[in-house]
Image: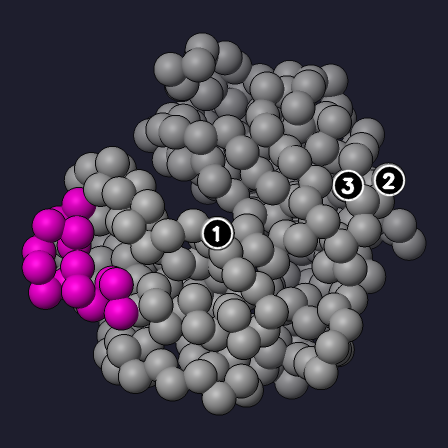
């Protein structure tokens, strides 16, 4: 099995190293000091489950790699529409794209029966720009429950969790999903093939939709947000509104708000990925996490006043970040 990891950051390099350890032919697409370190010393994974080092091929030029069986997409969702030059050399007619993104994916209504079948989520696929680069038939969804960070160039610290759920948009248990999942399991990861991945999407989104924008707006950690009575109340309202939108789309996550809050508290003084991006002056990945849910609320008629307010504030913050980056 030949796999390219496009966007070999914290999660991408961790997955790539694990697959390489399992015997897959792995190619990491990276850049800068991270790429240099991987080329020189491999990917070093530091984990309570056992440290290991893998030496997959690494490059900044996908043309060196050529067509692969699977592309594991570790890019931020707001980079998908412009990743065409990077991903095109990696594709043959049967290549799948396993998109490890937070929030609502561009393929959300693909393969789904019902009144919204085939509808485009404009917020995450404006004018079909993402679909043009990542055709629906290639898409395999992926919900990441593992937490990792780049502790130094070429070095990945595994913080918690090893589960990356995958699934076809139409709910089938396909041969390509089974092939990828088997390799992930052989590499020491959990990779269930879910017949209803949208349930997993909304479960994870319950946390992301609240903690990610609030952390950026307040500069607070997840524990800090939970401990402050005011922000904790906002989180609860945002989660309730999110569950209402999901229910109107026929998805009923069986995880309570209290359980999601308890899980967030257990992470301690952890900075969300959105807060980390803010501190680095990077664009905030909130369209898929928050704005898309507001769009789905408009579609289904769900009243989401708290989500709308936080979306407006976070949107202005992102505009300021983009101005300062110019």
Identify residue for label 2: 175
Labels 3, 1: front one? 1
Q: Position of residue 89 (x, y in %)?
A: 78, 52
> Who's the residue at 44% across and 73% down the image?
244
Residue at point 54%, 76% (across, down): 248
Task: Judge whether 123 appears above or below 185 on screen.
Answer: below
Image quarter in which the N terminus is found: top right
Residue 40 visible, this orientation: no
- Tell me the distance, in whole angstroms, between the alpha carbons under discs 3 and 1: 24 Å
Q: Which residues are magenta?
A: 223-237
Left or right: residue 183 versus residue 155 is: right
Q: Which mark is residue 184?
A: none
Compared to residue 316, the image places residue 197 above or below, namely above
Give the Cα distance between marks 1 and 2.
28 Å
Q: Quadrant of residue 4?
A: top right
**Mark 1 near mark 2, Cβ–Cβ under 8 Å?**
no
In the image, residue 225 lies in the stretch drawn in magenta: yes
Residue 216 appears at what percent x and percent y? Answer: 23, 62
For label 2, the SS is helix
**SS state under label 3:** helix
Which is nearer the N-term, disc 3 or disc 1? Answer: 3
Q: Of label 1 and label 2, which has the lower sequence position? A: 2
**Pointer 3 residue:** 177
Residue beneath disc 1: 254
Q: Nearer the viewer, residue 244 or 201?
A: 244
């Amino acid at each position: 099995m030949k796999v390219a990891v496009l966007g070999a950051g914290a999660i991408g390099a961790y997955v790539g190293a694990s697959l390489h350890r399992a015997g897959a032919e792995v190619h990491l697409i990276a850049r800068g000091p991270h790429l240099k370190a991987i080329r020189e010393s491999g990917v070093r994974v530091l984990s309570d489950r056992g440290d290991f080092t893998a030496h997959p091929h690494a490059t900044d030029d996908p043309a060196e790699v050529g067509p692969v069986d699977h592309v594991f997409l570790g890019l931020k969702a707001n980079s998908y529409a412009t990743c065409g030059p990077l991903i095109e050399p990696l594709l043959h007619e049967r290549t799948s794209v396993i998109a490890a993104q937070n929030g609502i994916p561009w393929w959300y209504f693909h393969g789904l029966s019902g009144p919204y079948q085939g509808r485009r989520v404009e917020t995450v696929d404006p004018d079909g720009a993402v679909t043009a680069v990542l055709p629906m038939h290639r898409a395999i969804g992926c919900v990441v429950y593992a937490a990792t960070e780049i502790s130094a160039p070429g070095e990945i610290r595994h913080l918690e969790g090893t589960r990356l759920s995958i699934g076809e948009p139409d709910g089938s248990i396909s041969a390509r999903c089974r092939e990828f999942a088997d390799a992930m399991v052989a590499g020491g990861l959990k990779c269930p093939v879910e017949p209803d991945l949208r349930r997993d999407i909304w479960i994870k989104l319950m946390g992301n939709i609240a903690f990610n924008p609030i952390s950026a707006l307040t500069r607070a950690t997840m524990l800090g947000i939970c401990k402050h009575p005011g922000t904790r109340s906002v989180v609860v309202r945002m989660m309730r509104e999110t569950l209402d939108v999901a229910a109107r789309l026929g998805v009923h996550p069986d995880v309570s708000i209290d359980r999601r809050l308890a899980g967030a508290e257990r992470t301690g003084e952890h900075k969300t990925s959105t807060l980390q991006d803010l501190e680095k002056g990077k664009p905030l990945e909130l369209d898929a996490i928050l704005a898309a849910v507001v769009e789905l609320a408009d579609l289904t008629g769900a009243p989401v006043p708290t989500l709308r307010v936080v979306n407006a504030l976070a949107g202005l913050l992102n505009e300021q970040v983009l101005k300062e980056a110019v």
